[in-house]
Each structure stands twice: as C-alpha cells, then as structure tokens.
Amino acid sequence: MSPPAGERPELSILEAIREALFEEMGRDERVMVLGMDVGRLGGVFRVTRGLMERYGPDRVVDTPLAEASIVGASLGLAIGGMVPVAEIQFLGFTHQAFHQIGPQLARYRFRSRGRFNAQVTIRAPFGGGVRTPEFHPDAIEAQFSQAPGVKVVCPAFPDDAKGLLLEAIRDPDPVLYLEPQRLYRSIRGPVPAGDHTVPFGSSRLVRDGKDVVLIAWSAAVHLCLAAADQLALDGVEAAVLDLRSIVPLDVEGLVAAVQKSGKAVVVHEAPLTGGFGAEVIATIQQEAFGSLDAPIRRVAARDTPYPPGSLEDHYLPSVRRIVAAARETVAY
Amino acid sequence: MLDVEGRISGSSPMSRGQVLEALRLMLLSRAVDDRLIKLQRMGRVGVYGPVHGQEAAVIGSAMALDPQRDWMVPASREHPAMLRHGLPLKNMFATYMGNFEAAAIPDGVRLLPRQQSIGAQLPHAAGLAWALKLRQVRGVVAVYFGEGASSEGDFHEASNLAGVMRVPLVMLLINNHYAISTPASRQSAAPSLARRAEGYGFPGFEVDGNDLLAVYATTLEAVNRALAGEGPTLIECRTYRMGFHNTSDNPKEYREPSEVAEAERRDPIERVRRYATAEGLWSTEQEATTMDEIRAEIDAAQAQVEELPRPGAASIFKHVYASLSPRLEQQRAEAIDEST
C-alpha cells in the first residue's frame, strides 16, 4: 500500500538505520563507516548500500576480515579525530574482538583520565529466528554489560532504530548498537524525517495493560506483543515494556512499569543463566519489592550452545512460552 | 654503526647535540630504574619493570620522531621515549607511585597511555595512523611492542591492516629476548621477526638494538618513508633485557649468568659513553655534573608526587563515561559516604 500523497512512507528497521547513516555522514564529515563488505556490497544485509557511492571509499571502507583490528583501529581513528561507525558482521563475531571492546575501547577514557575518549559506534546484527548457523544469531549482549565504559543499545522499532543510532554516533563514549536481524525488513513504521534522537536509558511502554508487564528488548519485544495479543483473547491485559538500552538501564521506567500490576515476566533471546534478565529482576526486587504480587518469571533461550537453525525453535523463547509464563504469573 | 668499543663505522647520523641528548636520556633512564626499584623495595611503588639494557633501542628510535608532529604509542617499558616525547618526569613517577590522576598525559602531548594488555596497542596505532592519512595531517605514528607481543593476534591484524591501508606507521619491535621467562626462541621458529613484514607487503629491518646510532638511522628512514606516503615499516631492534621483567621477577631462575655477562659487555650506554668521549663530547667530570642534575630532577619529581593529594573514592567514578548514569551516581555517593 502506498502512502497518501505528501506523506512520508513508513520505513523498515534496515531503511531507518541506512537513513541515519546517510544523514549523519552528510552532517558530520568526520563520520566514517568501516567493516567487512560494507562498501561495494553494502553489507551482507545491504544496510550500507549506496553509502560508498555517495561518500567515497575513504569514508566507507571495506576492511580485512579481522574483527579485533576493526574495533582496535576504530579506537585509534577516534583518537585521530574521526568518528568511526564500525560494523561487525554478526554480534557472535565480536568474540574475536572482545579484548578490544571491554578492556580497550570501553576503558580508554578512564585509563587516560579523560585525555582520550572513544567516540566509536559498533553496529552488529544478532538474534535468532532466521535459521542462520551458529555465531550469527548469538545473543551475547549481557557480556558487554560487564564492561563498564561501553553502552549497549538495542532498538526494536524503525523510529528507535534511527533515533538510537544518531544518539550513538554523537555520543562521546563507545556504543554497541545491536540490530535485530530477524526484524530488519519485517517491521515497518513511521520514522521522523531529519534529526531524531532517542536518549539512552529511557525505556518505552509499547503497550499498556493492568494485569502483568512483559519486559524485553530488541526482537523479543515483538514476541511479547504477539503474546499480549493472545493473552487479550482470554481477557488478560498485558503491558509490554521495551528497555531500548540495557546499559544504561532505565531503573525508574522499569520500576514504574512493574508497580502498575505488581507482576512481571522478563523475556530474552540469550541463554537463561546469567542473562541480562537476571539483572533486571535483581533490580526490580531491590527497587520495587513492596509492589510485587508474584515471583518474576523469565522466558529465555535454553542453557545450551546455539543449535542448528532447524532446531532453534526448541532453544529460543517463543510466544507460547511467554503466554504460559504470563498466565502462571497472573494466576499466582 | 657503533661497535661494543664505541668505535663508529661511517659518519654519525646524529649531530653532536643529539648524541649528548641521547646519552643524557640513557643515564636518566637508568637512574630512574634505580630509584623506582629502590622505592619498590621500600613499599612505596607497586610493581616496576626496568628499561635496563634497552636504552639504545628505546631512545634511539624516539630521537627520530618529532614530538610536535608525530604520535607515540608505547607498550610498557619505554619510559625514556615517553619522557623525550613530552611526558613530564613527575607524571611518570605518579604512574608508579599509584597516583593515576597525576599520571595522565598532558593535553597537547602526542602520546597514548602505557598498554598493559600485550599487543593491544597495535591496532590502535594502525587506526591512529590511518586517521592522520585520512585527515591529511603530516605526521607518523610510532608504536612499541616486544617479541612476545609479536605472537599475539593483534600484531598480525594490525600489521595486515596497516599494510592494506598503507598508513604512516613505524612498528618498533623491541626484541629483548625474554617475555618474563620465555625466551625469544619459544615465541617463533622464524630466525627473523623483521622478515614477517614481507608477508604484510611492507619492508622490515633488523637492527642491533644496542647501537644507538643504527636504531636512530633506521627509524629515521622509516619515518621518512611514512611521511612520503610509502606506508608502514617494521623494525626489529635486537636487544637484551639486562634486568628483571619486573620487581616481582627473579631472572636467575631461568637464565645463565654467562648470558647476562655477555649482555653487560654489549651495554648500550657504555658504547655511547666511549664514543662521545673519543669525540671529545664527554668526560668523567661532565658525567658527574650530569648525574647530579639527574638526581636533582628525580628527587624533585618524586617529591612533587609525594606532596599531591591521594586520589579518593570519587576518582574511580571519573572518566568512566562523559556523564554518569543515575545508577553510577548512586554508587558514587555510596563509595564517598563509606570512605568518609
């Protein structure tokens, strides 16, 4: 369906990210994009398609296949006055760069006592549901919450995809920007034209409801929305809270959302044990214990290595599991 | 260029003034080693890794850089190079005396902080050199690392990227033959680490790292190549760690006295001293005067650090991010509360 004349068409998440990159590279000539296959090909998902033609091969750079040096060189580029937006082809491949993210990029401002900051954005798609081989879907975001100095943001909607990316590129500190690959093209929505930023540490109540709140980030937000639709058929009103960033965490927004119903379910694509859901729940019990009416449940991936794509439905959180957890929580 | 007797072959690439500057830095470096080891034994310094034996490699290379134009990316045993590049001696003492606020690199000094994660500075240096190239800023980046670091993946990734992007980078591999107790022969089966450069598409040179003039001349050539847009150079400075890895190490447990005696015969400072004396640039009287000046400088630096307030609880929350999240604000308040 085409939009009415004069109205801006809705964008997919992928298009919103691309728009943010185009606009910011036009606004600030220090901004450059680097990574594997980001130039001529436009990235394996085509997120950066057209950027090289527009801004040239010095600012949109196909790098060697080496994640640690993509991140490490980005730190050096930032010290040298550039504003790098590095793409790591899939978040699971940041394992190959982990020592350059947590111990280096994240700590450089601290180590240099403020002499050098690392204005670096790392974009990385992640998440399951599209039958990719292992590493491609790994949801290892919680690992970076243990690396003070870096911020971790995870949009679930096209407007937030643009707003959080512009915020990330302009942030004087390093930001890991996680892209929900299963939603790249499947979700469309209105996106403000031109400058649009979303502050980090501000969650978004994407659906209101009085019986229970489903808390998630990135693609799992949409599982929660589908679960809320199903619960509504039984008369259960589920709210859905999208954290949008896990570092910094919007403690205030989280507490407010939980206090409304006193009941919560946390959903994430990472394995259960030590997932960021544990941090969310620990925060709720400390800050909102008095308002809780039921134990908080977690719906997460299984504590196994990522299975082959053909088996991932047994591994990942699903709408069915979220609905079941929410029903038990409401009935408690 | 300088043999162990201090005899020169050919003409000196360094001016008389540069030779004197280098000799003074070498003497300062060894005096700093002595003082910090002494302070460590007194419990006033945590851990210290001396430069002892590597002075020619570190200072000869630093002398080929222009601190107003070039960047230096150190590992962790290049203090005299950092001093020459503009780090005040007081800040260096603060590093080891546990005052990280006072240790910070002053604005305007083109120097990155010491790196304790072996080899991790190499991709940073490649990126920084890449930025100079992209922004068309005239200058080079000199990065220090050891033969141990050359076994790390970061060495490979940084060298490869630097070659592909043809960045103005001078890679100074200070082969001091020991990574704590592990000898260079266990780092690589290759007889020359310099020759690895060929695999990355740029030149590599091996140089006697105890020969101040040879290190200087080789580095200068690499700097000029980089400035001319010809890309990176790898220089393997073959030297010897005459002292311990750091103050918690006992090298007698893993190396023979004869090996150390041979290294002492090849002492990099003694060569320059003999050369400068033969050239009429140096005398025992001048050395005595210089050593008095150096000791006074060191005393002053140490005293300045001792007089500074110790950083407190609040300092660990500074510079984590540009601004603190509410959660960090809360932790900061708790930590300050607890400490008062």
Image (spheres, coloured by chain):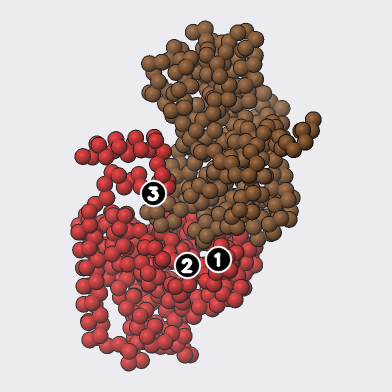
Chain colours: A brown, B red
Label 3's element? loop
State the mark number for residue B319: 3
Q: Is residue B92 left or right of residue B188?
A: left
Q: Nearer the viewer, mark 2 or mark 1?
A: 1
Do discs 1 and 3 share a chain?
yes
Mark 2 touches mark 1? (CB < 8 Å): yes
Label 1's element? helix
- For label 2, count other residues whose C-alpha is less than 10 Å away and answer few (under 14), some (14-19) or many (20+): many
Specify the subunit that label 1 lies on.
B
Q: Identity of the amino acid at label 2?
A: Trp
Q: Which residue is mark 1?
A: B132
* Camera-nearest residue between B245 and A311: A311
State the mark number for residue B71: 2
State the mark number for residue B73: none
Nearer-N-terminus badge (2/3): 2
- For label 3, count other residues whose C-alpha is less than 10 Å away and answer few (under 14), some (14-19) or many (20+): many
Nearer-N-terminus badge (2/1): 2
* Camera-nearest residue between B339 and A98: B339
Label 2's element? strand
In the image, residue B133 sits, relative to residue A317, either above or below, namely: below
Q: Split into 4 quadrants, where in the image is the N terminus of chain A?
A: top right
